[in-house]
Image: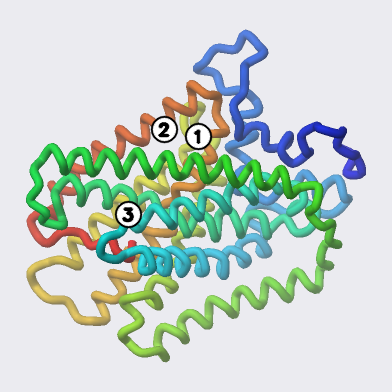
Amino acid sequence: MDLDHKDPPGGLPTALRRTNTLTRRIPTSPQTEDEPTQSEVQSLESIEQPPSEVSQHLERKPTGPFSIHVLALLIPFSIFGALARLGLDGLANYQGRAIFPLAYAQGVGCFVMGFVVGLKEPFGRFYPPLYTALTTGFCGSLTTFSGWQLDVFNSWVDAGQYQHGGLRNFVDGVGKSTFTLAISMASISFGLQLGSVMYPFFPSLAPPNQAVCYIITTICILAYAAVFATYFLMDPDFRHQATAALLFAYPGALTRYTLSVLLNTRLQTIPLGTFLANSIGTALLGGFNVLQNKSYPVSPSACSLLQGLLDGYCGCLTTVSTFVVEARGLAMRRGVRYALFIWAWQLAKVPRLEMIGVTNTSFIDIDNV
């Protein structure tokens, strides 16, 4: 690949052609629908991993998915992603709102995800770990799949106690599911298109040398240590609201990233790693809510830590932005089947939440999930 190649007038930028696996494709070979194409496999492998192919062309050592620089840079971006989600949720949660608060976090996260994916090649030329930090760390932590599921669940069980009947509860839950998918898909598309427009104007920056890379890595590790200081030194009233969640944001994002890298290509039908991350995170979210809402009281510290696990670990372990990008990366029919499968799986989770006693304690509060 020639990095000095100029795009033809009126042609698509190179970045958009490289991310063509995220757009609609027409099969050109007599391959069956049940057999994934090579581009689909490559798409699932490279959505969140650092673009090491560009590094190889520049005769630099490729950045591995578990490089210390990649793992360390996830720390501040996952923390900022969780903090942005909590901030957007608090900003959009008011009486008379036009749409459910979680829609803002899902939309913003998917938009940034699409924009960064559209500029994957420039990020790879500059600093590949930054691409993974933005997609997996920030966008994956800003969007949350478990919060979406619990939002729908609360609509179906009338958690707000509006007393407007079962049919309207069902319509409310379906509406939240439909609008979440629509907003996420539209935001990803808008981000990709904006990235393709900005690609010719994106500055070509010199990559940092090895010393600067290690300085950045050290600062990121110290940033995680600062989170613990923030939790213990700030007013305890902030623990339930934000500081406890920041403790668990990085572990949640790291778990999701590890599952994605190791398992996403194990199955031909679905990205297994992302599916397991969303499944485990949603199950843990239900369990933590049951513990938090037990009839016997828990200590304030334990309650804050449980809320931190809800907002931080579960919120960052599950993601909508990666799920949507992966669905777009598949062929049209396969992508629709994947999205419908996740939808059906979401519906199947509701009886399980009822069985573990959520509806017999108190309703789930997802204002900060």
Q: Position of residue 264 (x, y in %)?
A: 52, 39
The answer to whether mark 1 and mark 3 are in CB contact below 8 A is no
Q: Residue furthest top?
A: 30
Q: Is residue 269 above or below residue 231?
A: above
Q: Earlier in the sequence, mark 2 or mark 1?
A: 1
Q: CA distance from mark 2 to mark 1?
A: 7 Å
Q: Earlier in the sequence, mark 1 or mark 3?
A: 3
User: Badge 3: how crowded within 10 Å, few (<14), some, or many (20+)?
Assistant: few
Q: Looking at the image, which is closer to me, 182 or 357?
A: 182
Between marks 1 and 3 in the image, the one whose residue lies nearer the viewer:
3
- Left or right position of 100 against 74: left
Q: CA distance from mark 3 to mark 2?
A: 26 Å
Q: Is residue 308 above or below residue 319?
A: below
Q: Looking at the image, which is closer to me, 26 or 211?
A: 26
Describe the element under mark 2 as helix, strand or loop. helix
Dot 2 amino acid type? Ala
